[in-house]
Image: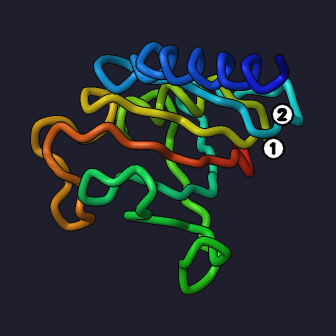
Amino acid sequence: LNQRSTNARIHIKIMAAPVSDAWKQQGFDIEFLQTKSASKPKAGQMVTVHCTGYGKNGDMTKTFWTTRKSDGAAKDEPFTFQIGKGKVIKGWDEGVAQMGLGDRAKVKCSPSFAYGAGGFPAWGILPNSPLIFDIELLQIK
């Protein structure tokens, strides 16, 4: 009985997987890995993040860019940008806006919330690629 129950759960998870991937078609999804604060950034503020981007050459396990030494960067080099003003891809503007100071989340972006039809060839991002970003909000000014 236990073996059948386990197999049934695995089968249900496999069947449900396409629903959880709806973000790949349109929009974005955010999965919080840690939450620390309710203090969220407002449009126009400067935010500093650590980030690792996944989806190089269409492979969601391959890194195309990181600010973290622990993920392969030469040194820790956080990235700062003005939020809510279109200075970064839409998925970052909308995803980071939902994060509190100190939060870490996976922001999953459909192509229209990432680099779209043009991709970003210099980083190995193919046209119309969905991407995943592991983002940690370090500072809000």
Q: Which residue is pictured at 35% across the width and 38% down the height?
A: 89
Residue 135 vs 28, above or below: the answer is below
Question: The residue under label 1 is which amino acid type?
Answer: Gly
Q: Is 5 displayed left or right of 120 in the figure? A: right
Residue found farthest to the bottom? 74
Residue 75, disc: none
- Circle 1 sits in a helix, a strand or a loop, which is it? loop
Residue 125 location in percent, x, y? Answer: 24, 55
Quarter of the view holding residue 65 = bottom left
Residue 108 location in percent, x, y? Answer: 47, 33
The answer to whether the residues at label 1 and label 2 have Cβ atoms under 8 Å apart is yes
Q: Is 37 displayed left or right of 44 in the figure? A: right
Q: Is 81 displayed left or right of 5 in the figure? A: left
Q: Quadrant of the C terminus?
A: top right
Q: Which residue is pictured at 20% across the width and 55% down the height?
A: 120
Question: The residue under label 2 is which amino acid type?
Answer: Thr
Q: Which residue is pictured at 48% across the width and 16% down the height?
A: 15
Q: Which residue is mark 1?
A: 102
Residue 79 vs 86, above or below: the answer is below
